[in-house]
Image (tube, grey):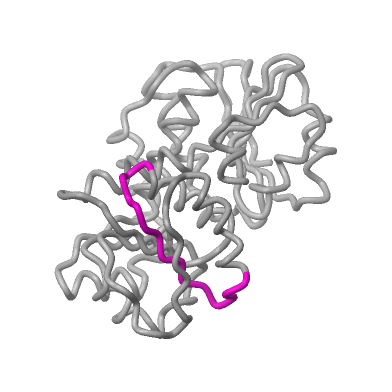
Amino acid sequence: MTAEAAGPAVTHRAAVLGSPVAHSLSPVLHAAAYAELGLTGWSYGRVDLGEDALAGFVDSLDASWRGLSLTMPLKVAVLALDGVEVSGTARLAGAGNTLLLDGGSRRVENTDVPGLVAAAGRALHGPVLTVTVVGSGATARSAVVAASRLGAGRVQVLARDATKAAALAPLASAVGVDLVVPPWGAEPPPADLLVSTVTPGAVDDQADRLAASAAVVFDVLYDPWPTALAAAAARLRTPVVDGLDLLVAQAVEQVDLMTGRRPSPGVLRAAGDAALAARG
């Protein structure tokens, strides 16, 4: 874990877990939240670890630990930990990105879903009937749930592996949306919102077509920025939501869950922008 800065005694600890996490802005955002809220005894770090090490790490934590933020590849693995209570949203999405620790209790939450809804909602200015989700992993599952909460009745999942995309059908049915799996590489069907959940470079060769298919484009990546998809949308003057918008929105929810205090999204966004600018 990263070293803690000298200062007040640390009484409450949290961290982001996953692999890799060296690039993560979560420590920056949570530190900004603690500073704004005057939580001087709180510390937030990062730990690089994979699925096999998750259970042992969690079991090793002392009573000072209040929460963990989970990124890939841990969002599904966390649901299988012994003795965890899983929130309705995390169970529905089949993925959790937050583990709350309070004495002996462990609770898995999913703040990606409300984060996706909040971030997308600021760019949407009309009804959302159809959402395209690019990808079929844990974040894509959260995006399907978020689409239903935005009011969509139809979700189109674009993925290289059509079998994995089709496997989202039970989830789509559970949240009351129709699932369509267009052929990968075909002309993307039109949508009110497109959410790309894939890794850097995965859709660069389709960026122009994807951007042209949607009224609003949401790319969950934030570094490097802009992605080819975001740049294509900008050329078309299509509204773009970036991954930092999502990271901020879900971090606001995480801080609230872990500390009982709610930070200002603008404070976290400013801290994230400054950190990205410093990277050059």
Q: Nearer the viewer, residue 15 or 78?
A: 78
- 63 in magenta: no
Residue at 52% across / 68% down in the picture? 199
> What residue appears at the point 33 percent right and 67 percent down from the top-left corner?
226
**Quarter of the figure with residue 162:** bottom right
Q: Nearer the viewer, residue 2 or 63?
A: 63
Q: Is residue 39 left or right of residue 153?
A: right
- Give the vertical position of 109 relative to 276 (above or below): above
Q: In screen coordinates, is 97 left or right of 271?
A: right
Residue 28 image point, x, y percent? 46, 40
Relative height, residue 57 to residue 264 (above, below): below
Image quadrant where one finds the N terminus: top right
Image: magenta residue range: 149-163
The image shows residue 180 at horizontal and vertical percentages of 44, 67
Q: Residue at x 41, y 80 (%)?
A: 204
Q: Is residue 109 above or below residue 75?
A: above
Image quadrant containing the C terminus: bottom left
For residue 60, which quarter of the picture? top right
Question: At which x and y percent is residue 216?
Answer: 24, 60
Q: Residue at x 34, y 72 (%)?
A: 229
- Please give left or right for residue 160 compared with residue 103 in the image: left
Q: Position of residue 27 (x, y in %)?
A: 52, 39
- Is 101 situated above or below 78? above
Q: Quadrant of residue 87?
A: top right
